[in-house]
Image (cartoon, rainbow, N blue to C red):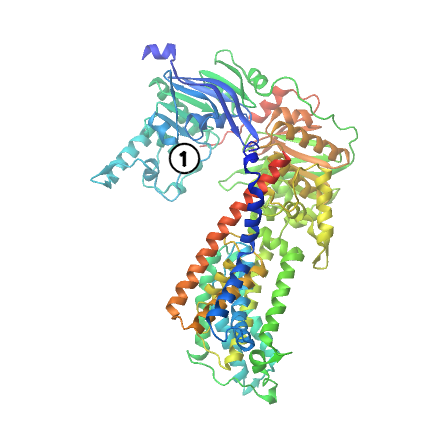
Amino acid sequence: MAGAMTGHPIGLSIRGGVKVYPGTRALKGVDFDLRMGAVNVLVGENGAGKSTMMKVIAGVEPLTEGEILMDGKPCHFRSKDDAQAAGIGIVFQELNLFPDLTVTENIFMGREITRFGHIDRAAQRRETAKLMARLEQDIDPDAALGTLRIGQQQIVEIAKAMNEDARILILDEPTSALSSAEVEVLFRLIDDLRRQGVGIVYISHRLEELIRIGDFITVLRDGEITGSRPMEGVDIPWIVTEMIGDASKDFPPRATRIGQEVFRAEDVTLPREAGGLAVDHVSLSVKAGEIVGLYGLMGAGRSEFLECILGLHPHAGGAMWIEGAPIGRPSVAARIARGVALIPEDRKRDGLIQIMAIRENITLSALKKFARAFHLDLKAEASGARDFVSRLGIKIASPEHPVSSLSGGNQQKVVISKALMTGPKILLMDEPSRGIDIGAKAEVFRTMRALAEDGLAILFANSHLEEVMGISDRIAVMADGRVTATFDGETAPAAEIVAAAQKQQKVPA
Amino acid sequence: MSTTSTPTRPMSGSSGTLLLFLKARTFIALIVVIAFFAVAAPNFLTTANMVIMAKHVALNAFLAIGMTFVIITGGIDLSVGSIVGLCGMVAGWLVLYGVDLGFAWTIQFNTLEISLITILVGIFVGMVNGLLITRLNVAPFIATLGTLYIARGAALLFSGGATFPNLNGNAEWGSDSFRWIGAGTVFGIPVSIWMLVIVAVGAAYVARSTPLGRYIYAVGGNERGAALSGVKVRKVKMIVYMFSGFCAALVGLIIASQLQAAHPATGETFELNAIAAAVLGGTSMSGGRGHIGGTIVGAFVIGILSDGLIMMGVSTFWQTVIKGLVIVAAVVVDQAQSGLEKRVILRQQAALG
């Protein structure tokens, strides 16, 4: 045991790991070593490839090229079950639980204790109670999972992985939903597991947390490992540099002409379902021709704030103005008519009607433009859609094909076209570069800049520091629902932006 | 993706033909059914028989048109059969008794007024469906299942379960023309067929060439996405269920007029035939896809199939089995078509790089 503590043997490694998804290379030849009896911290921006790498290890996705070695021998996981049998447990970022079943049933899902072919409920309940005692959690084994707080559900998920006697435990952002007291419990538990020789992979965006808990750190950027070392001597600036690189890529030049104020929000609030505020007294203004970047971690309230502007939350508080006039009642149609347009974060779920044609998607928000009384002028509509296809350079075979046949970058341009067709005064973009490859990203940024040059005000949320710093004229940082700092886009220091995004209000447990 | 496209290139011509064939499948099925009965059943192709069959089909087609819009928005309307029964009873009551105001005062209505009131009742039930679904967030299946029972019960309560007979109307009140709705003809074609033509053309126009039609498809394709694009989802759903109620009311009126009697059990299981016609016509139960034209053809296939089988003397038990087989086959082919369509389009898109 003592030898393991000092030596930290390598329990699993990836050599030359490549993972290709249609349209993107998520992993570009990574070499990764997972050390046993230690916390292996994994950090990188959204889309850097962390989750993909963990899915490969957990057998959820196969590698396109390269191999996985366990104790020096190559192994092939065809499914999650294979990996589980090899002692690998994973707690996913999104919960994979059954809300209507009890805590016990969730923990033993798929590996029930049976006696004479029927489930031994009493034994399962005893085991669950033991697990909960070990986790210092006062959770009733018979409670329906859906009645627990999200944080508690996360604990149940961790208990489930522990119950599987994992030798390697992967935790993908386990603390994003936990209160500070629950985080302490989790950390004690991780310490405990580490002493028992379990190899832990810990993914998080909270850098201070990583430095506190980690023994080894691996930084990923764009599917490549940019830094890998023991945790001694690592500080936040080092991590940030490795995460985003130092030279900004080819971002278009910044605004030359900034005009009148187009949009102003004062003390916008939005209550969270679980209590507290998702958007906590946010005040912000955007001028014509200006691109304002809204930086923050996941769950910082950026998307919610943008949704408030679009009028999606009727119970939101505060006041907003467009060109000096109050924005009016919270109805999406009315707000669009007032000149607000949103490019949603989740293109598939919110941005597009997948089974409709490209043309129909482009014109959906602005159909009234092509209608006289109730009659829709289909010819005018088609030519309007064609205009945008050529204006934004969307690559399509025919505007009548379903939009789902396009690549991510082209789909995003369809969403942008739809928003622009309403003739907006302010364009809200939630993670406009998510899920599209680098070439298409650059094109999206050029489009944004060109639109701003035409006098459009743009407010965009982004969790990629490099992108926010590269394109914003002004940067507002959000954490925990509040704007914690604002910077000038050109001179903002990266470390300060990151620090501002990490500011947490102490939430009572 | 691009590497595999080379060997499949010679296939694209034949898969294009196959796709065309699959797309027109309901129409082809209609032709096959007509051709089969033309040979197998004597008198099938006579004008008189065609008119009779068209009148049968029209009843289902009305309901199927309303149902198509509901299904395209991703919902379902199980209450239409009951609305038919209820509206028939309302029309029957108005023809026979008028509205009793008490104090020995009774208002009598002419045919137009009776029709309008009946239609309003149908729209009202549709509105109740819509409110349950959009305001109280009841799942469409459950909400309309509830109104199915409520409307049927209300129809039975009207007469205590009895039939309103002899709906001849009264010339004095201007309701003697009530029979004309079901029995009259214009240019030799029954009134109900003309009504179907008007409703079908109107519905097809709305679906194709109005913003409302586009919104209906958008709501069914992705409700959240539609809402974020500024589509008033609740309003669209309300309209769709009210229109379905309207169509059901027309059927109730026509049946009451044709039979000159209103029976409270009229319209039982009509909703299932309407759903079958819509599905047969290519409407996707998951929403977002469907065409009025397809639905009409689907209604004709089902109607002609059952009438033709009767003429051939096939037992009603077998008719039911055959109808079920046709529906299942239609859905299986539909799946094959959308899979093939996706492949063809992806190939064209991949060629662009």
Identify which residue is drawn at 53% across, 69% down.
B248
Give x and y (percent) for residue A440: 64, 31
Give x and y (percent) for residue A395: 66, 37
Element under disc 1: helix
Nearest the eye: B136 or A6: A6
Residue A396 seen from this side:
yes
How many marks overall?
1
- Left or right: A9 in relation to B212: left
Circle 1 crowding by C-alpha within 10 Å: few under 14, some 14–19, many from 20:
some
Question: Residue A295's image quarter?
Answer: top right
In the displayed orientation, state which residue is furthest to the left: A116
Give x and y (percent) for residue A270: 57, 41
Nearest the eye: A213 or B346: B346
In the displayed orientation, state which residue is furthest to the bottom: B172
Query: Dividing the image into 4 quarters, which one contains the C terminus of chain B?
Result: top right
Q: Is residue B109 above or below residue A319?
A: below
Residue B79 seen from this side:
no
Nearest the eye: A202 or A279: A202
Q: Is residue B332 above or below residue A435?
A: below
Determine which residue is flagged by label 1: A152
Q: Is residue A483 above or below residue A377?
A: above
- Left or right: A130 in relation to B271: left
Query: Dividing the image into 4 quarters, which one contains the N terminus of chain B?
Result: top right
Give x and y (percent) for residue B259: 50, 80
Kind of residue indicated by mark 1: Gln
Chain under callout 1: A
Q: Is residue B49 above or below residue A422?
A: below
